[in-house]
Image (cartoon, rainbow, N blue to C red):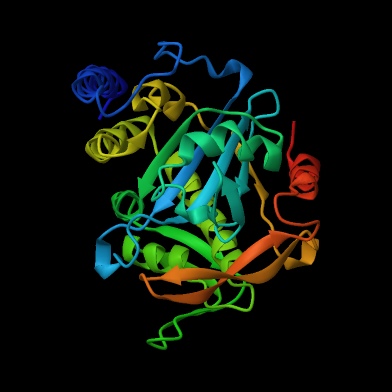
Amino acid sequence: MNRKVAVIFILLVVIILAGFSLKFQRTFFVFSNGDGNKDFSEGTNFLVLGRTGKVIGWNFAPDLADSIFLVNYVPKVGVVNLISLPRDLYVDIGGEQFKLNEIIKRNKISEFLNGNLVEMTGIKTDRYVVIDVDFVKQAVDDLGGIEVNLPSPAVDWASGYTMPAGQRHLSGEDVVWLVRNRYSSEGDFFREKNQHAVIKSIFEKYKNLGYFDKAKFVFKTMPFLSQLEGNINPQEFLTPAFNLNNLRFNDVVFDFSTGILQSSEVVVPVGTSSTSSAYILIPRAGEKNYGELKDFIQSKIER
């Protein structure tokens, strides 16, 4: 296809997507200032909550967040600081104590953004999006799969299924399994590192597409975007989506080697007449003392 035809196709896609966005404006709230044409020249921050979807039977905890990322884009250095927040971190939000992965279920996202997030990271934002794993599966399959280099095997203790270490070509279903797998001595930290690897691989695969294939991918993605929850309008990312060639990721991930977090247990109610203990993570400095977390994140992000 010659360049003129490709340009015409892209313009048609833009028109269709603009109409699509207006159609779903009740689902996607434009920025708080009412400006849908966000200027990314000074950077942007938003929270991404990855929620269990319905693909391949993964629907055990549909209201819990399997992944929690703070995206911090710094255009002057061309970097996205991708900051993982541990889902088992025990938090106090509005007088309620629970694992961070329950903020969707408990409807505490806004309170978290307005309080705990800044205490933990030193970065402020009021913007977020909730993404079902179904969307990730579809995106990977639409890209024809992705390549991920696993530093160690990923094993499902229940079925015995093992994804060997090394360079692997993953389908959407493979990716869903990998980003939800935490059967490792590192637990959820293992899952978070694999999630970062998958995100970067999706980005690289998309970045290397031609303009025509990028437009085709964006067009196929829009129906799924319309189903997302949050206060980000997908139309604002339309132009940046075609200009990602110089962008790179900087990973910020916690694990036990940092010495900042430690495991503990908490008693939780089960039903109306019994209790059970639940595994949690708390700061080494004490519950609700996030100073070391913030200092670690601030030391690792690129500015």
Residue 229 placed where, x, y %?
Answer: 33, 37
Q: Is residue 38 left or right of residue 184?
A: left
Q: Quadrant of the C terminus?
A: top right
In the displayed structure, 272 sits above or below 131; it is below
Q: Quadrant of the N terminus?
A: top left
Nearer to me, 93 or 114: 93
Q: Is residue 150 left or right of residue 6?
A: right
The residue sitting at 32% across, 56% down in the picture is 137
Residue 255 placed where, x, y %?
Answer: 70, 63
The residue sitting at 55% across, 35% down in the picture is 113
In the displayed structure, 20 sits above or below 138; it is above
Nearer to me, 109 or 221: 109
- How many circles with numbers are drawn on the protein? 0
The residue sitting at 45% across, 69% down in the picture is 269
In the displayed structure, 13 sits above or below 36; it is below
The residue sitting at 21% across, 24% down in the picture is 20
Q: Is residue 266 left or right of residue 104?
A: right
- On the question of residue 208 being in view, the answer is no
- On the question of residue 290 being in view, the answer is yes
Residue 75 placed where, x, y %?
Answer: 64, 25
In the displayed structure, 251 sits above or below 184; it is above
Q: Which residue is situated farthest in the front direction here?
A: 273
Nearer to me, 94 or 279: 94
Residue 22's image quarter? top left
Residue 181 placed where, x, y %?
Answer: 47, 71
